[in-house]
Amino acid sequence: MSKSYDKQVDVISNINVTIEPGEFFVLVGPSGCGKSTMLRMIAGLETITSGTLKIGDQVANHLSPDKRDLSMVFQNYALYPHLTVQQNITFGLDVKKVKKATQQERAAEVAETLGLTDYLKRKPRELSGGQRQRVALARAIVSESPICLMDEPLSNLDAKLRAHMRTEIRRIQRKLGITMIYVTHDQVEAMTMGDRIMILHEGEIQQVGKPIDIYNNPANPFVATFIGSPPMNLAYSDADKKASEIVIGDILRLPVPSNEIITIPEYQLIAGIRPEHLRPALKESPEEDKLYVVVTNVEVLGNETVFSFKLGTNEWKAKWSGQWHIEIGDSIPILIDYGAFCLFEARTGDLIKKSTDLGNVVFGKEVLV
Amino acid sequence: MTSLEKPGIWKKTANGRTALLYLLPSILLFSVFVFYPMFRTIYLSFFLTDQNGDAAIWVGFENYSYLLESTAFINSMKATGLFVLYTVPIGIVLALFFALLANEKLKGIGFFRTVYSSTMGISVAASSVIWLFMFNPSMGMFNRLLSLLNLPQIQWLLDPQWALLSVSISTIWMNIGFSFLILLGGLQNIDEHLYESSRIDGAGYFYRLRRITLPMLSPTLFFIITISLINAFQSFGQIDILTQGGPSASTNLIVYSIYREAFINYQFGTASAQAVTLFIIILVVTILQFKLGERRVHYQ
């Protein structure tokens, strides 16, 4: 399936992407970035101003929603409150004049998969949020459409249920092999569910790619701060070519290998580093590598510790695994490697240097052997 | 031990007394304008009255039995029944039709919404006068139209065959604004996502109307049917202006008949008896509606 858009108005512009069959494709972005609009354009609920939308090999710009052979799950589920769960699930089949017996059969089958069998006779208002969500899901699945669109389906659920449904939806998608286009504002959902994700901001694509690639090599500072929690630490920086150093946030000077310093441009840069790449300085670390920072906030999460500190005018966060007994106001030494930094051009936001030193957080399977 | 003391009556009723205080203004108003007249009417219906409308002779249920034998009253009941039958279903179906039209998202739809609901803003008296002109046999709009089409002229308000129908037509027109507005409100309350979802499933307009709109609108429809029924039973103004109950009592609806009995014939006793009968009829119809109709209503 291929799809390309150019909607030249304010909301969405220059979207050009191909979504592969059987793929779990996530559209993610802050609210108001046009991701729902885009989904609705795919569904045919919103007109496409210009550009073409192709579903399969067919241009679908002017196809009515039902001719596009897709199903959709709405944020508020859009369950029919006057119909029972069973009727809700079979609504679409009934429209398509599927035989009653077949309807029953398919509804029962889907209900079985989603654990809704006991609730078929109930009305939506008698169900909990999670159950309603599953009915909405069942309604999408029962149509057996090859494409399923989901518009923030988990945003009305509590955190625990959301985590559960994430894996549930992913499992169903894999099992049925449907192409899923999933809209969310939650970067955790995007990271955990998507085969590929597209980050949208103000109606424009920021980056498309595999979640891990995007995490490791964000295309611009927006993506860098949007994906990952806590977000990537950013600071303005300049290259000091004479000293072969890079000055970050006017305070931190890091030596740069001489073969790399020539590739760094003159203009102002934004340097970014992931919180987990700020490492604790150990006793044996050479004193000149240590940077002493004053802790302004500490969050101990059980398996990891996140603390904040000021670097110039920026508040940065560091994430260390394990429980660290750090108090607010402590001055602690940390290690910062030049290799772990991403560099962006300040004006355009373009990535000019990828983070290369991922050694301490990326592991291959061979480590286990 | 003070905590074991039983709270006194005064303390126990504290909440009730506060509630009563809040209710006091409406209780007072209702008593003066609703409860007192109601009980007075029931009281009067058991008496023959003098010219001042004071109870004179106790006659028990004689007023009622007189009514049931009176052909005038029976006719009046029939006319009222027909009038309700003409106005309520047609009025609601038309209002629903207009509301469905006006609920579409089109440019300038606000203008049509205003126009369709505008009859709500015209008093019964004023609109009756307008209709009086339109029904006028010689210079009225309708007869002009008929003569243009070479059709025979109709004595709209003067022909006993036609008078009730004419009054019904104008009543439908008068009531449509209110029903339209309420139904439009109900339609706007239906979640847009339901329609979008059904469009993805491929449901056509009438399928959506039958499976989504009407069930979702049923509470509003139920409300408007109840209100319209009660309203139709109580129609008075348009009768008074258009026909005065004539010709040959063909439009002598029950409220108008009550008015004539009381304020023209000074028979407050029988008038009260009619009023009580009307009250009972409306009560029964409404109860029946609740019993039968509410089963079909889907509340959210």
Image (tube, coloured by chain):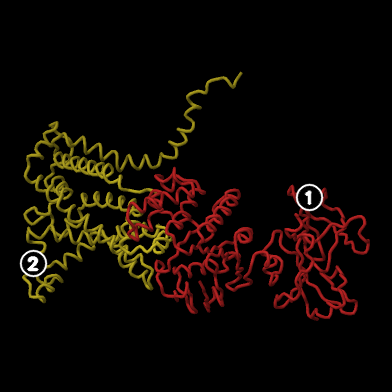
Q: Quadrant of residue A293?
A: bottom right
Question: Would residue B221 be found to the left or right of residue A33 on screen?
Answer: left
Q: Position of residue B95 (x, y in %)?
A: 27, 60
Q: With respect to residue B7, does A226 lie above or below?
A: below
Q: Which residue does the image show at 52% across and 69% down from the upper left? A: A38
Q: Colour of chain B?
A: yellow
- How many labels sit on residues? 2
Residue drawn at the location 13% of the way across and 42% of the way down: B267
Q: Colour of chain A?
A: red
| Element at label 1 | loop
Q: Which mark is residue B89?
A: none
Q: Which residue is mark 1?
A: A322
Q: Which mark is residue B154?
A: 2
Q: Nearer the viewer, mark 1 or mark 2?
A: 1
Q: Residues within 10 Å of mark 2 (few under 14, many from 20)?
A: some
Q: Amino acid at mark 1?
A: Gly
